[in-house]
Image (cartoon, grey):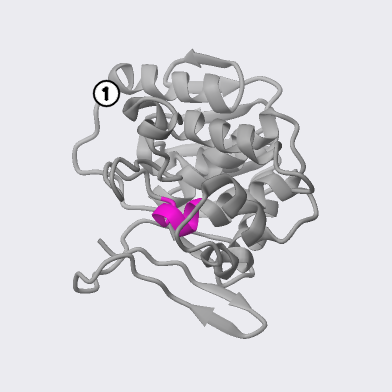
Protein backbone atom coordinates (compact mmCIF):
# COMPACT_ATOMS: atom_id res chain seq x y z
CA UNK A 1 0.00 0.00 0.00
CA UNK A 2 1.18 3.50 -0.82
CA UNK A 3 0.89 5.91 2.06
CA UNK A 4 1.20 9.49 0.85
CA UNK A 5 1.72 12.51 3.04
CA UNK A 6 2.64 15.72 1.23
CA UNK A 7 3.53 18.65 3.43
CA UNK A 8 4.68 22.03 2.16
CA UNK A 9 6.36 23.93 4.99
CA UNK A 10 8.73 26.68 3.96
CA UNK A 11 8.89 25.27 0.45
CA UNK A 12 9.67 21.72 1.59
CA UNK A 13 7.62 18.97 -0.02
CA UNK A 14 7.86 15.60 1.70
CA UNK A 15 6.47 12.28 0.56
CA UNK A 16 6.78 9.15 2.69
CA UNK A 17 6.22 5.47 2.08
CA UNK A 18 5.76 2.99 4.90
CA UNK A 19 6.94 -0.04 2.95
CA UNK A 20 8.84 -0.98 -0.17
CA UNK A 21 6.00 -2.09 -2.41
CA UNK A 22 5.76 -0.59 -5.90
CA UNK A 23 4.02 2.79 -6.03
CA UNK A 24 0.34 2.83 -6.91
CA UNK A 25 -2.21 5.60 -7.37
CA UNK A 26 -4.06 6.70 -4.25
CA UNK A 27 -7.71 6.55 -5.31
CA UNK A 28 -9.11 7.96 -2.08
CA UNK A 29 -7.58 11.11 -0.62
CA UNK A 30 -8.18 14.09 1.62
CA UNK A 31 -6.63 17.51 1.37
CA UNK A 32 -6.58 20.90 3.04
CA UNK A 33 -7.60 23.68 0.63
CA UNK A 34 -4.71 26.05 0.03
CA UNK A 35 -2.06 23.72 1.48
CA UNK A 36 0.03 20.91 0.00
CA UNK A 37 -1.14 18.37 2.55
CA UNK A 38 -2.58 15.13 1.25
CA UNK A 39 -3.70 12.07 3.21
CA UNK A 40 -5.45 8.87 2.33
CA UNK A 41 -9.02 8.71 3.58
CA UNK A 42 -7.90 6.03 6.05
CA UNK A 43 -5.30 8.38 7.51
CA UNK A 44 -7.72 11.30 7.61
CA UNK A 45 -10.39 9.25 9.39
CA UNK A 46 -7.93 8.18 12.06
CA UNK A 47 -6.63 11.72 12.46
CA UNK A 48 -10.20 12.99 12.82
CA UNK A 49 -10.91 10.40 15.51
CA UNK A 50 -7.83 11.49 17.46
CA UNK A 51 -8.91 15.12 17.24
CA UNK A 52 -12.45 14.20 18.31
CA UNK A 53 -11.19 12.51 21.46
CA UNK A 54 -9.02 15.50 22.35
CA UNK A 55 -11.91 17.86 21.72
CA UNK A 56 -14.30 15.80 23.85
CA UNK A 57 -11.85 16.07 26.75
CA UNK A 58 -11.49 19.81 26.42
CA UNK A 59 -7.78 19.54 25.71
CA UNK A 60 -5.97 22.43 24.02
CA UNK A 61 -4.99 22.14 20.34
CA UNK A 62 -1.41 21.32 21.37
CA UNK A 63 -2.61 17.91 22.56
CA UNK A 64 -3.98 17.09 19.12
CA UNK A 65 -0.76 18.25 17.45
CA UNK A 66 1.37 15.98 19.66
CA UNK A 67 -0.97 13.01 19.20
CA UNK A 68 -1.09 13.37 15.40
CA UNK A 69 2.69 13.59 15.12
CA UNK A 70 3.04 10.56 17.37
CA UNK A 71 0.52 8.44 15.48
CA UNK A 72 2.07 9.44 12.15
CA UNK A 73 5.47 8.25 13.35
CA UNK A 74 4.20 5.07 14.97
CA UNK A 75 1.80 3.83 12.30
CA UNK A 76 1.59 6.44 9.52
CA UNK A 77 -1.89 7.08 10.93
CA UNK A 78 -3.01 3.54 10.15
CA UNK A 79 -4.74 1.23 12.58
CA UNK A 80 -2.17 -1.55 12.25
CA UNK A 81 -2.82 -5.13 13.28
CA UNK A 82 0.91 -5.77 13.66
CA UNK A 83 4.01 -4.14 15.07
CA UNK A 84 7.20 -4.67 17.04
CA UNK A 85 6.56 -7.53 19.46
CA UNK A 86 2.93 -7.07 20.53
CA UNK A 87 2.57 -3.42 19.45
CA UNK A 88 -0.73 -2.66 17.73
CA UNK A 89 -2.89 0.14 16.44
CA UNK A 90 -2.42 3.83 15.72
CA UNK A 91 0.01 4.42 18.57
CA UNK A 92 1.59 0.96 18.53
CA UNK A 93 0.53 0.40 22.12
CA UNK A 94 1.52 -2.89 23.73
CA UNK A 95 -1.06 -4.95 25.62
CA UNK A 96 1.77 -6.61 27.57
CA UNK A 97 2.78 -3.19 28.90
CA UNK A 98 -0.61 -2.35 30.34
CA UNK A 99 -2.09 -0.26 27.53
CA UNK A 100 -5.17 -2.45 27.24
CA UNK A 101 -6.27 -5.58 25.42
CA UNK A 102 -5.35 -6.20 21.78
CA UNK A 103 -8.92 -5.32 20.80
CA UNK A 104 -8.88 -2.12 22.83
CA UNK A 105 -5.62 -0.69 21.51
CA UNK A 106 -6.89 -1.24 17.95
CA UNK A 107 -9.92 0.90 18.73
CA UNK A 108 -8.84 4.43 17.65
CA UNK A 109 -11.03 6.13 20.25
CA UNK A 110 -9.70 3.98 23.08
CA UNK A 111 -6.11 4.24 21.85
CA UNK A 112 -6.26 8.03 21.58
CA UNK A 113 -7.82 8.22 25.01
CA UNK A 114 -5.01 6.18 26.56
CA UNK A 115 -2.43 8.34 24.81
CA UNK A 116 -4.02 11.49 26.23
CA UNK A 117 -4.27 9.90 29.68
CA UNK A 118 -0.49 9.58 29.69
CA UNK A 119 0.20 12.84 27.85
CA UNK A 120 -1.43 15.06 30.46
CA UNK A 121 0.75 13.45 33.14
CA UNK A 122 3.95 14.62 31.42
CA UNK A 123 5.25 17.75 33.21
CA UNK A 124 5.18 20.79 30.93
CA UNK A 125 3.63 18.93 28.00
CA UNK A 126 1.70 22.01 26.87
CA UNK A 127 4.85 23.96 26.01
CA UNK A 128 7.59 21.32 25.90
CA UNK A 129 9.47 20.12 22.82
CA UNK A 130 7.13 17.89 20.84
CA UNK A 131 9.49 14.97 20.35
CA UNK A 132 10.56 14.99 24.00
CA UNK A 133 6.96 15.03 25.20
CA UNK A 134 5.85 12.34 22.74
CA UNK A 135 8.71 10.09 23.78
CA UNK A 136 7.85 10.57 27.44
CA UNK A 137 4.56 8.85 26.61
CA UNK A 138 5.79 6.31 24.07
CA UNK A 139 9.28 5.40 25.36
CA UNK A 140 10.44 4.82 21.81
CA UNK A 141 13.66 3.29 20.61
CA UNK A 142 13.84 6.31 18.26
CA UNK A 143 13.01 9.22 20.59
CA UNK A 144 13.83 11.99 18.11
CA UNK A 145 11.72 10.60 15.27
CA UNK A 146 8.51 12.38 16.23
CA UNK A 147 9.96 15.81 15.44
CA UNK A 148 9.93 15.22 11.68
CA UNK A 149 6.11 15.20 11.71
CA UNK A 150 5.67 18.52 13.50
CA UNK A 151 4.81 20.34 10.26
CA UNK A 152 2.16 17.82 9.26
CA UNK A 153 0.58 17.80 12.71
CA UNK A 154 0.57 21.59 13.00
CA UNK A 155 -1.09 21.87 9.59
CA UNK A 156 -3.69 19.16 10.20
CA UNK A 157 -4.77 19.77 13.79
CA UNK A 158 -6.20 23.30 13.25
CA UNK A 159 -8.22 22.01 10.30
CA UNK A 160 -9.79 19.19 12.29
CA UNK A 161 -10.57 21.53 15.18
CA UNK A 162 -11.68 24.54 13.12
CA UNK A 163 -15.14 26.09 13.46
CA UNK A 164 -14.91 27.41 9.89
CA UNK A 165 -16.60 25.75 6.89
CA UNK A 166 -14.96 23.45 4.36
CA UNK A 167 -11.54 23.15 6.00
CA UNK A 168 -11.08 19.49 5.01
CA UNK A 169 -12.13 18.00 1.70
CA UNK A 170 -12.03 14.34 0.73
CA UNK A 171 -12.75 12.51 -2.49
CA UNK A 172 -13.21 8.86 -3.32
CA UNK A 173 -14.87 6.62 -5.86
CA UNK A 174 -18.01 5.10 -4.34
CA UNK A 175 -17.74 1.34 -3.96
CA UNK A 176 -19.20 -0.78 -6.73
CA UNK A 177 -21.28 -2.62 -4.18
CA UNK A 178 -22.52 -0.78 -1.10
CA UNK A 179 -24.42 -2.34 1.77
CA UNK A 180 -27.95 -1.15 2.33
CA UNK A 181 -28.69 1.87 4.49
CA UNK A 182 -30.20 -0.44 7.09
CA UNK A 183 -27.00 -2.48 7.22
CA UNK A 184 -24.71 0.56 7.43
CA UNK A 185 -26.78 2.60 9.86
CA UNK A 186 -25.75 0.86 13.11
CA UNK A 187 -22.03 1.38 12.47
CA UNK A 188 -22.31 5.05 11.51
CA UNK A 189 -24.69 5.93 14.33
CA UNK A 190 -22.43 4.18 16.83
CA UNK A 191 -19.38 6.07 15.51
CA UNK A 192 -21.24 9.39 15.63
CA UNK A 193 -22.38 8.70 19.18
CA UNK A 194 -18.81 7.98 20.31
CA UNK A 195 -17.05 10.77 18.41
CA UNK A 196 -19.38 13.45 17.14
CA UNK A 197 -22.61 13.79 19.13
CA UNK A 198 -26.10 12.36 19.45
CA UNK A 199 -27.37 10.86 16.17
CA UNK A 200 -30.93 10.69 14.86
CA UNK A 201 -31.58 8.44 11.87
CA UNK A 202 -34.48 9.16 9.55
CA UNK A 203 -34.97 8.23 5.89
CA UNK A 204 -31.30 7.40 5.35
CA UNK A 205 -30.01 10.62 6.91
CA UNK A 206 -28.14 10.82 10.21
CA UNK A 207 -28.69 14.20 11.88
CA UNK A 208 -26.40 15.35 14.69
CA UNK A 209 -28.00 18.08 16.78
CA UNK A 210 -25.62 20.62 18.27
CA UNK A 211 -22.72 19.57 16.03
CA UNK A 212 -20.40 22.16 14.53
CA UNK A 213 -17.74 22.34 11.85
CA UNK A 214 -15.26 20.07 13.68
CA UNK A 215 -17.90 17.35 13.56
CA UNK A 216 -18.61 18.10 9.90
CA UNK A 217 -14.90 17.68 9.11
CA UNK A 218 -14.98 14.44 11.11
CA UNK A 219 -17.88 13.22 8.96
CA UNK A 220 -16.09 14.04 5.70
CA UNK A 221 -12.94 12.28 6.92
CA UNK A 222 -15.01 9.16 7.64
CA UNK A 223 -17.18 9.39 4.52
CA UNK A 224 -15.23 6.78 2.55
CA UNK A 225 -15.37 4.34 5.45
CA UNK A 226 -19.15 4.64 5.70
CA UNK A 227 -19.80 5.35 2.00
CA UNK A 228 -21.63 8.59 2.70
CA UNK A 229 -23.15 10.26 -0.34
CA UNK A 230 -23.26 13.76 1.18
CA UNK A 231 -22.49 15.79 4.28
CA UNK A 232 -24.63 18.89 4.80
CA UNK A 233 -23.86 21.66 7.28
CA UNK A 234 -25.00 25.25 7.75
CA UNK A 235 -25.44 26.23 4.12
CA UNK A 236 -22.74 23.95 2.74
CA UNK A 237 -22.91 20.56 1.04
CA UNK A 238 -20.07 18.09 0.52
CA UNK A 239 -20.14 15.15 -1.90
CA UNK A 240 -17.34 12.71 -2.75
CA UNK A 241 -17.24 13.87 -6.34
CA UNK A 242 -17.50 17.65 -5.95
CA UNK A 243 -16.19 18.39 -2.47
CA UNK A 244 -17.66 21.36 -0.57
CA UNK A 245 -20.14 23.68 -2.27
CA UNK A 246 -21.81 26.70 -0.70
CA UNK A 247 -25.60 26.36 -1.03
CA UNK A 248 -27.07 28.67 1.63
CA UNK A 249 -30.59 28.69 0.22
CA UNK A 250 -31.03 24.95 0.53
CA UNK A 251 -29.47 23.74 3.75
CA UNK A 252 -28.99 24.63 7.38
CA UNK A 253 -28.09 22.96 10.65
CA UNK A 254 -28.16 20.40 12.11
CA UNK A 255 -25.28 18.47 10.61
CA UNK A 256 -26.59 15.82 8.25
CA UNK A 257 -24.83 12.69 7.04
CA UNK A 258 -26.50 11.12 4.00
CA UNK A 259 -26.18 7.37 3.62
CA UNK A 260 -27.95 6.98 0.31
Locate the C terminus by quadrant: top left
Q: Position of residue 101 (x, y in %)?
A: 36, 25
- Residue 231, position in %: x, y? 53, 37
Q: Residue 118: tell me if it is visible.
A: yes
List x then y, in percent, for residue 253: 69, 28
Q: In the rendered structure, does residue 229 fall within the stretch colored magenta?
A: no
Q: Secondary structure at mark 1?
A: loop
Q: Residue at x 38, y 22 (%)?
A: 187
Q: Is residue 188 left or right of residue 116?
A: left
Q: Pick whichever, 243 or 84, lies toward us.
A: 84
**In the figure, residue 218 lies in which quadrant?**
top right
Q: Residue at the far bottom: name it.
A: 11
Is 75 covered by the magenta stretch? yes
Q: Is residue 15 above or below residue 62?
A: below
Where is 182 relative to 48, above or below?
Answer: above
Question: Would residue 167 be seen by someone viewing this image from the given angle?
Answer: no
- Give the residue at mark 1: 180
Instruction: Judge by depth and name the residue closer to the eye, 139 or 117.
Output: 139
Q: Is residue 246 above or below residue 94?
A: below
State left or right for residue 193 relative to residue 162.
Answer: left
* Residue numbers of the magenta segment: 71-77
**What main secondary structure does the magenta stretch of the protein show?**
helix
Q: Is residue 132 left or right of residue 227?
A: right
Amino acid sequence: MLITVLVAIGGLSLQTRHDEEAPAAVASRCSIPGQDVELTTEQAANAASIAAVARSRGLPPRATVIALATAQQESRLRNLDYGDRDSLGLFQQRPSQGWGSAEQVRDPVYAAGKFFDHLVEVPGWETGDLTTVADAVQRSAFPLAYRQWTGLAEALAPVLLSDQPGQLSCSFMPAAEVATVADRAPAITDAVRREAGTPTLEAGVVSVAGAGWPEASWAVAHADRFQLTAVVMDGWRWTPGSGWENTPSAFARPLQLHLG
